[in-house]
Amino acid sequence: MTISSSLNAGVAGLQSNATRLASISDNIANSSTYGYKRVTTDFQSMVISSKGGTYSAGGVRATTERLIDQRGSLVSTSNATDLAVRGRGMLPVAQVSEVQVGNGDNQMYLTTTGSFRTDADGYMVSQSGLVLMGWPALADGTIPTYPRDTSDGLEPVQINVNQFSGEPTTQMTLGVNLPATETDAGADGDTQELSVEYFDNLGTSESIGITFTPSVPGTGSSNEWTVTLTDSAQSGAVIGEYVLTFDDGRTSGGTLQSIVTSTGGAYDPATGSIIVNVDGGPMEINIGKIGESDGLTQLSDNFAPVSISKDGSPVGNMTSVEVDANGYVHAFFDTGITRTIYQVPLVDLPNPNGMVALDQQTYLPSPESGSYFLWDAGDGPTGDVVAYAREESATDVAGELTAMIQTQRAYSSNAKVIQTVDEMLQETTNIKR
């Protein structure tokens, strides 16, 4: 009967608007929840009447959808490991309970923001119990090649806050001026000595002793020096000896003219370097190219070590951890060195809204979301990772309150329809008294 279909349509209207009100209340309740994705409710009409004849009301049906691809604005924080994704892509995380059990591969969940701090075991954990996931780096800071269509290579990011680190010295540059007057006839021929510190493979301080001995001729100027290098780690053993001849021409006076190797690694004119073997392994020492004044020179009457530089560092303590825009996790040490220890990829899917929404603003890929791919942050369609930032809720409170007014009026109107149908049915009942 048509009047009965009106009653059913009114009831369906009440149910649908109640569903919309539930989504509105959820959005408003999470208006201050970082990373919250708002829920929308859409109505679809139900048409069940056939062509011609009496019309029968089909009512309405409500469907809800969480807009996971809708992003909130970013706000700055004071914590270096507060992370947010600016643009497309999501951070891979795991449940801390699964990590602590350690019974196999951890299920990868996705989120767009999180406030991560180290727990008692050094894991980067958020207050909601999510552990940041990433690819571990090798000892030299490089990231191996991992499969991008699976989460098998991801591991919980674990920071050893009591970690020590040192860098051995492998390269050294000598910028030293030798006195030209010491190679003149009648000069005293004083030997010039220099000691340069370096760090071995265990971070221990050692030194390379360098002596410059001039060749004093009977007449004129020899412009020749013998350079001897010794290693303190080998009890002062000689690791290299070279005979240097300097140019005294008008245009290139004072620069290296030739180098003869007595012992040690041969001089490479292309790089201006020699390679000697200290106790910890080979070390490249740059003394300058032939004809250029970027290394050893012979000018005037002063011995002057003007520029000596080297890599490496002593053992230091880790002081802090930061994540850069490309998702690389860097550990900083009090000696000034920085090491890359993890890379956090960004996960992208064809249909983010098709993922399964779970607690704590986490999402799980599903057949509806499509196959995911792990990108380097800033590469492909993905955005970048922003440290010292959180993503605010995507809820617009003013818009939700406006929708609440509309929903309340629609609910009241549907209730009025039911009341009217009730009155009409009462009138029908009163026909026979």
Image (cartoon, rainbow, N blue to C red):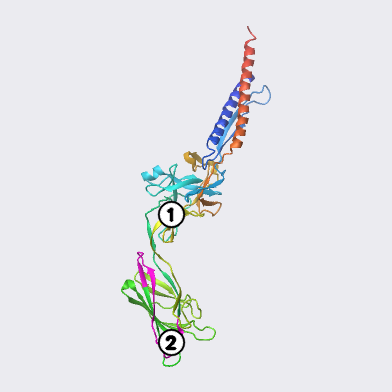
Mark 2 Cα shell of 10 Å, populated few (<14), some (14-19), many (≥20) = many
**In the image, residue 161 lies at what x, y percent?**
39, 53
The residues bearing labels 2 and 1 have C-alpha atoms spaced at a distance of 53 Å
In the rendered image, residue 311, in percent from the top left (x then y), is placed at 43, 67
Q: Position of residue 33 (x, y in %)?
A: 51, 40
- Quadrant where the image shows the N terminus: top right
* For residue 310, above or below residue 31: below
Quarter the C terminus occupies: top right
Q: Amino acid at mark 1?
A: Ser
Viewer-proximal residue among 138 and 401:
401
Classify mark 1: helix, strand or loop: strand
Amino acid type at image mark 2: Thr
Residue at image mark 2: 183
- Label pair 2/1, CB-CB below 8 angstroms: no
Quadrant of the rendered image containing residue 167: bottom left
| Badge 2 or badge 1: first in the primary sequence | 2
* Disc number placed over residue 162 in the picture, else none: none
Q: Nearer the viewer, residue 223 or 242?
A: 223
Q: Which residue lies most toward the top here?
A: 433
**The furthest residue to the bottom:** 219
Which type of secondary structure does the marked residue at label 2 adopt? Answer: helix
- Estimate the x, y position of residue 243 in percent, counting from the top left: 41, 83
Q: How many marks?
A: 2
Please say whether residue 247 is one of the residues in the magenta stretch: no
Q: Residue at x 41, y 44 (%)?
A: 96
Specify start and end residues of the magenta stretch as a single range: 178-207
Q: Quadrant of residue 50?
A: top right
Q: Residue furthest right?
A: 52
Residue 320: mark in rendering: 1
